[in-house]
Amino acid sequence: MLEKRARPAPTSIPDASSLRIGIVHARWNKECIDALVSGCVSNLTKSGVKEENIIIESVPGSWELPIATSRFISASQVQESSSGSTDLMGGLTDLASNLTTKDGAGSSNTASKKAFDAVISIGVLIKGSTMHFEYISESCCHGLMRVGLDTGVPVILGVLTALTEEQALERCGLGNSAKKHNHGEDWASAAVEMASKTSAWS
Ligand code: DLZ
C-alpha cells in the first residue's frame, strides 16, 4: 500500500555552496514561525548553503507574503546588477536596503551579491471563527505561485494552513504529537533542489 504522507527524497544531493537563498516570513503565530525559520536555516546550512547567503526578512502577516516575496526577488536582482559599481546597497531605497543576513548584522562584504536562487515564503495561518483564514490562505498561495511563475525564481510554499493550533504546532515540530515534524526542514530541501535545478536549466 502507498505510504500516504511520504516525503520524496531528491534524486541527487546538489552542491549548495554557491546558492543564495531568501527567506521572507510573516510574524503572526510567532512560536511556530520561529521554529519553522530555524528548522529551515539549520537544514539550509546542513545542505551546504553559507550562512551569509541566507537572507531573512519579515512582514506583518501571510497576506503580505506575495508582494514582499516579489519585491525581495527584484531587489536582489537589482543588487546583483549594480554590484561592482556601488558599495554595499548602492542607495537602493526599497527592500534591498533592508536585506539583512541571518544574524541581523546587515549585508557584509563577504556576502555574495548574486540574486536569489530561491526564496522560501513562510507563514502560519490558523483558522478562526470568521472567513479571514479562507481568504488569506487562498490569496496567499495563489499569489506566491504567481510570483514564482512571473519571476522564474523558485518560490517555496512555506505556508501552513492549519485548522487548529495543535495541527500548526505538530507541523512546526512542537507540541505533544508523536507525528510532529518541522516542515521548515522540508522547505529548505525543496529550495536547494529547485535552486540547483533551475540554475542548471538557465
Ligand atoms: C488578520 C490575520 C488573521 C486573522 N490571522 C492571521 C494568521 O493566522 N496568520 C497570518 O500570517 N496573518 C494573519 N492575519 C494578518 C494578515 O495576514 C495581514 O497581515 C493583515 O490583514 C494586514 O494586511
Image (cartoon, rainbow, N blue to C red):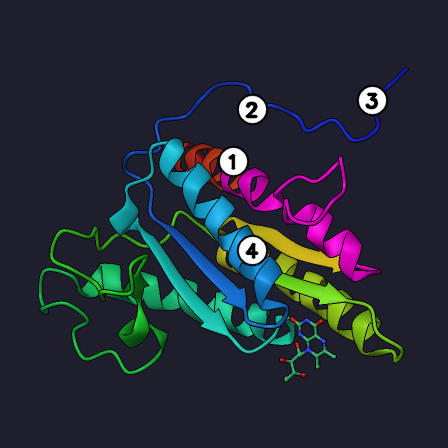
Label 1 vs 2, first from the N-terminus: 2
Does residue 191 show up magenta in the picture? no
Kindly state the secondary structure of the residue where label 1 is placed. Answer: helix
Residue 124 image-quadrant placement: bottom right
Residue highlighted by disc 1: 189
- Name the residue rendered at 76%, 66% in the picture: 126
178, above or below 60, in the image: above
Kindly state the secondary structure of the residue where label 3 is placed. Answer: loop
Kindly state the secondary structure of the residue where label 2 is placed. Answer: loop
Residue 11 image-quadrant placement: top right
Labelled disc at residue 148: 4
Cβ of disc 3 within 8 Å of ligand 1? no
Label 4 vs 1, first from the N-terminus: 4
Residue highlighted by disc 3: 3
Estimate how packed mark 4 is, as few (under 14), some (14 to 19) or many (20 or more) residues with alpha carbons within 10 Å: many
Q: Nearer the viewer, residue 92 or 65?
A: 65
